[in-house]
Amino acid sequence: MPRGDDKLSGQTTPTINDVAALAGVSKKTVSRFINKSSLMSDATRDKVSRAIKQLGYVPNPQARALALRRNFMIAMLHDNPNGQTVLNFQKGVLAAIKDSELALAVRPVDRTSPELLVEIEAFLSMQRPLGVLILPPISERDDIVDLCKRLDIAYMRIGSTALDDPAHCVASNDRAVVHELTTALLAKGHRDIGFVRGPEGFRSPVEREAGFREAFADSGVTLDESLIGQGNYRFDSGLEAGRALLGRKNRPSAIFASNDEMASGVLHAAYSFGLSVPDDLEVVGFDDTATASHVWPTLTTVHWPIEEMGRLAAMKLVSEFLGGTTDEFDLDQVVVDSYIVERASARLT
């Protein structure tokens, strides 16, 4: 039986042709098995599997990549000021592909750069990934999606609301869960509730503020616009906004900050005014990052399922390379629900 020569070791190594001959199938069938295609019977799959084990055959990733005109890699594009968000999403993606031969390439970009599209195109054209995961806020740009389509590269958009058709999107329910949280604060009797916005240019701050405002409208309570402060998802902006809100004569009795970093800043602002949390002021955040349980008092917050979103997004993007591991997931799912986590900084029940 013909074998490939391993010139370094002086020993022969089995080839895909050897596997096909031993299994009594075509080379194309062996290739389908390696790529975890569903287009074969169980009997054929078993024959190929036994042949591979008997020969000790190891697929050549370079040859496979050349045949597919793709590398066995997922690209992840992001421009996000919250490093923990990126890490948590990455953790979910890696969990999805851990038992596969796929790799993850993380590519930070600058959404303000006039050369953004040129830089992304150069990266994708050089790397030729199987697919691209696009994190917010750049996931909201249709021109990046158009670029992926032109390069014939699969893509998945991640957002705080559905940004695309179900096959190309994974989202969270930010507006609905913030509505739920704000309604709980109003039901406790809070009327002067401060709100710290997220940065301009992101969809998540828009969705979260919309949920906040709609809760007031639906509860028949007038929202004091002067209690809306601006932040940028960073601690310092939460501290500054918190000091501005708490320095007012009619200071709020509760403050909702659009993420945990800013909520932590609000906590420090409260301490600087000699206020006790939650007795004098209740504070809530959003994300449920490690920060929420590391500050004191621990933060009541919204668990944003960014890790779960990363796992689902990867499953949807490259399901054909993950075999049976996707069977437990609904790959038509778009929304991964967030939920409230009650801790010490606000008592909602």
Image: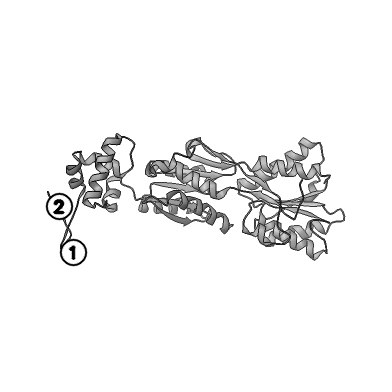
Residue 212 pos. (x, y %) = 72, 43
Coloring applied to the structure: one colour
As helix, strand or loop, the secondary structure at mark 2 comes to: loop
Q: Residue at x 74, y 41 (%)?
A: 213
In the displayed structure, does residue 245 sit left or right of residue 306? right
Mark 1 crowdedness (10 Å alpha carbons): few <14, some 14-19, many ≥20: few
In the displayed structure, does residue 312 sit left or right of residue 205? left
Three-letter code, disc 2: Arg
Q: Quick one: label 1 or label 2, which is nearer the N terminus? A: 2
As helix, strand or loop, the secondary structure at mark 1 comes to: loop
Residue identified by numbered label 2: 3
Q: Which residue is drawn at 55% across and 39% down?
A: 163
Residue 146 visible? The answer is no
Residue identified by numbered label 1: 9
Q: Give the CA separation, mark 1 to mark 2.
A: 14 Å
- Residue 77 vs 268, above or below: the answer is above
Residue 173 pos. (x, y %) = 62, 41
Frontmost residue, 96 versus 52: 52
Three-letter code, disc 1: Ser
Residue 84 pos. (x, y %) = 57, 57
In the displayed structure, does residue 191 sit left or right of residue 203? right
Residue 54 visible? The answer is yes
